């Protein structure tokens, strides 16, 4: 269900979402890099264009024993039609790969809790919109643990994404080449 219907609260991102619900308002920011922030505790993904939040959706992440990894990732591969090579050719429509060992965003069932084998399941309509908005290399930050929200996403409207590993390396190389590189050591 797309939750940006007329007559809703002034800030639609404040709305409580039920499993399968999402909000998608790309018109709030027409330029800037797309990046995503996944909160495993809240079972939500928030999508930003630049520093502006343009979407939020419920998800289903990895269940106990198959936890979704945390950290900063990049979209490594995108396929509209994809089938799992790990789980009996299970369909994974609108797959956006985050790791080469099987973690990805894709369309899937959303029971309201962590229930996947590590992937991040999305509502179909949201998955299509998110897939169309992203580019290869788009950063994705995954935080938290299942069952304990780490952040209040609504309070994070101007949140800066951390640098991706590739961006960190480039920044360190640039600083080292210019002689502005400093190392702080702690005991």
Image (cartoon, grey):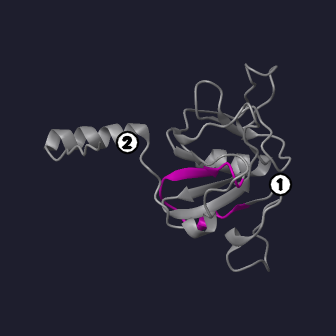
Closest to the observer, 139 or 34: 139
Residue bearing the label numbered 1: 19
Q: Position of residue 2 (x, y in %)?
A: 78, 61
Residue bearing the label numbered 2: 167
Secondary structure category for the residue under label 1: loop
Q: On the picture, is 181 further left or further right than 136?
A: left
Label pair 1/2, CB-CB below 8 angstroms: no
119 over 44 or under it: above or below: above
Q: Position of residue 37 (x, y in %)?
A: 58, 52
Rendered-image quadrant of the C terminus: top left
Closest to the observer, 133 or 51: 51
| Magenta-tinted stretch | 23-42
Q: Position of residue 162 (x, y in %)?
A: 44, 50
150 over 182 or under it: above or below: below
Within the image, what quadrant is residue 3 found in? bottom right
Q: On the picture, is 48 further left or further right than 62?
A: left
Q: Residue at x 67, y 56 (%)?
A: 149
């Amino acid at each position: 269900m797309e939750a940006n219907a007329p007559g809703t609260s002034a800030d639609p991102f404040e709305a409580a979402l039920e499993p399968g619900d999402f909000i998608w308002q790309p018109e709030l920011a027409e330029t800037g890099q797309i990046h995503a922030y996944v909160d495993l505790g809240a079972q939500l993904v928030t999508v930003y264009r630049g520093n502006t939040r343009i979407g939020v959706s419920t998800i289903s992440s990895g269940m106990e024993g198959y936890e979704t990894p945390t950290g900063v990732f990049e979209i490594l591969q995108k396929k509209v039609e994809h089938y799992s090579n790990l789980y009996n050719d299970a369909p994974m429509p609108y797959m956006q790969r985050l790791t080469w060992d099987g973690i990805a965003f894709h369309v899937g069932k959303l029971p309201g809790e962590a229930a996947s084998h590590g992937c991040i399941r999305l509502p179909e309509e949201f998955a299509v919109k998110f897939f169309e908005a992203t580019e290869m290399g788009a950063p994705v930050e995954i935080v938290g643990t299942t069952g304990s929200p780490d952040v209040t996403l609504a309070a994070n409207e101007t949140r800066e994404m951390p640098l991706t590993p590739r961006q960190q390396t480039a920044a360190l190389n640039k600083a080292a080449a210019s002689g502005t590189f400093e190392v702080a050591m702690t005991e």
